[in-house]
């Protein structure tokens, strides 16, 4: 199992979608090795300057000891601040193919994180009110569970209506 997260190299930053994945991995994925199954892909390398590619890959830190590179920022919560990152270009996915082939034989395990903790983390990152976010998250989870159960009941009922092969 693996999760591939993409970000355009020319943008020069960890975009919001990648930040959301980062928070989900940190707070929802289970196990000490959870970051080993994540591949950060810098896309559009063919449309990037050498400086932009260097910014994506660098492990340099600023005066506060924070990573300056895009991959370093993305993997800052991973053990040792390290993770698998590659670049792709139009028509060249060789680094990504190698990274996928090199994924460890670990299953990605996800657990529903505590709604209060997720509200705290996401509200800070997204600039929304914590209580409102938590309320909406809890409501979404209830709705999802309800619709999942309804879907299971419908599938189960449809199987009972139709005779199995060989029974006619």
Image (cartoon, helix red, strand yellow):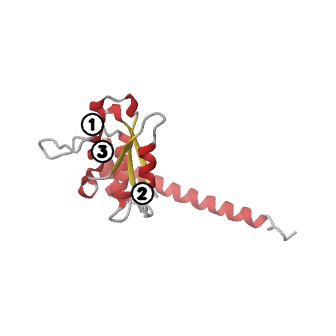
Q: Which residue is mark 3?
A: 71
> What crowding class fits label 2: few (fewer than 14 Cα within 10 Å), some (14-19), or many (20 or more)?
some
**Residues tagged 2 and 3 counted as in contact (Cβ below 8 A):** no
Is residue 114 visible in this depiction of the protein?
Answer: no
Q: Residue furthest right?
A: 168
The quadrant in which residue 12 appears is top left
Query: Image check: 48 left or right of 101?
Result: left
Specify the label residue 54 is tagged with: 1
Nearer-N-terminus badge (2/3):
3
The quadrant in which residue 35 appears is bottom left
Does 92 appear above or below 155?
Answer: above
- Work out which quarter of the rendered image holds the C terminus and state it: bottom right
Q: Secondary structure at mark 3?
A: helix
Front in this rendered view, residue 21 or 127: 21
- The x and y percentages for residue 90 are 46, 33
Q: Which residue is mark 2?
A: 103
Residue at image position (34%, 63%) is: 33
Q: Secondary structure at mark 1?
A: helix
Residue at image position (46%, 58%) is: 1
Is residue 1 visible in this depiction of the protein?
Answer: yes
Q: CA distance from mark 2 to mark 3?
A: 17 Å
């Amino acid at each position: 199992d693996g999760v591939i997260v993409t970000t355009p190299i020319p943008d020069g930053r960890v975009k919001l979608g990648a930040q959301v994945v980062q928070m989900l991995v940190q707070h929802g994925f289970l196990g000490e090795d959870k970051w080993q199954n994540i591949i950060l892909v810098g896309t559009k390398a063919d449309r990037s300057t050498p400086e932009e590619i260097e910014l994506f890959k660098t492990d340099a830190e600023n005066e506060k000891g924070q990573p300056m590179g895009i991959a370093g920022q993305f993997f800052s919560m991973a053990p040792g601040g390290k993770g698998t990152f590659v670049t792709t270009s139009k028509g060249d996915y060789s680094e990504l193919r190698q990274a996928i082939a090199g994924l460890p034989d670990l299953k990605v395990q996800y657990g529903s994180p505590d709604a209060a903790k997720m509200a705290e983390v996401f509200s800070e990152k997204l600039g929304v009110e914590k209580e409102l976010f938590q309320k909406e998250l809890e409501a979404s989870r209830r709705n999802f569970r309800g619709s999942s159960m309804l879907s299971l009941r419908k599938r189960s009922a449809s199987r009972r209506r139709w005779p199995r092969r060989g029974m006619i």
